[in-house]
Image: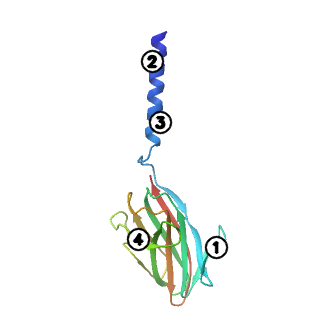
Amino acid sequence: MKKLIAIIALIAIGYSAEAQVRGSFGTYTPFTSTTGTINKVVAGTITPVTSGRLDTLTNADTGYIRMTLNSNYAMVFDLSMTKITGTLAGTAVLQGSTDNTNWVTLTGITTTCSGCQGASATITDGSAHYKWAVPVGAVPFQYYQMRAITTGTCTASYTGTVGYKY
């Protein structure tokens, strides 16, 4: 009977140790996606757009997709621009911040995904996705934003997501 109890105890210890390893940092799991908060500059102030609604950029306008993340993820940021009217043009950048106030423009890795951007992206007429890849162990930021600045005569909607692996 003592041998049976000892065997059961060893099996239980083995399962609990395995469960701890699977849940520890560094375990790779499939990419999970998070949608960022859409923000727009209104009267010189960055203002969140009502949750669950798209926003539009008109002519020379600035929009932001903001998100708060753990900095130890491998991430791919995806800014989606959809032309509604006119000729869509402008620039887009990925930025990081440690305090959600002071922002630094980031350079993504171009070898991680097809069509990934390095630093800034040139927004072109039509509808497109602009992506930036940030590897595990990159500069540790908790706050990220994708900033789109449109130029010319246009109306466009914008949204953004980040896919991450931990």
Image side of residue 61 versus residue 13, left or right: right
Assess disc 3: are there few (<14), some (14-19) or many (≥20) residues with their C-alpha within 10 Å of its C-alpha.
few
- The residue identified by callout 3 is 19
- The residue identified by callout 2 is 7
From what the image shows, is residue 5 above or below residue 47?
A: above
Q: Position of residue 143 (x, y in %)?
A: 51, 65
Mark 3, secondary structure of its residue: helix
What is the spatial separation of the Cα atoms under label 3 and label 1, in whole angstroms? 41 Å
> Are the residues flagged by discs 2 and 3 in contact, CB closer than 8 Å?
no
Residue 106: which numbered mark, if any?
Answer: 4
What is the spatial separation of the Cα atoms under label 2 and label 3, in whole angstroms? 19 Å
- Dividing the picture into quadrants, the one containing residue 105 is bottom left
The kind of residue on which mark 3 rests is: Ala
The kind of residue on which mark 1 rests is: Val
Residue 136: which numbered mark, if any?
Answer: none
Mark 2, secondary structure of its residue: helix
From what the image shows, is residue 151 above or below residue 107?
A: below
* In front: label 4 or label 2: 4
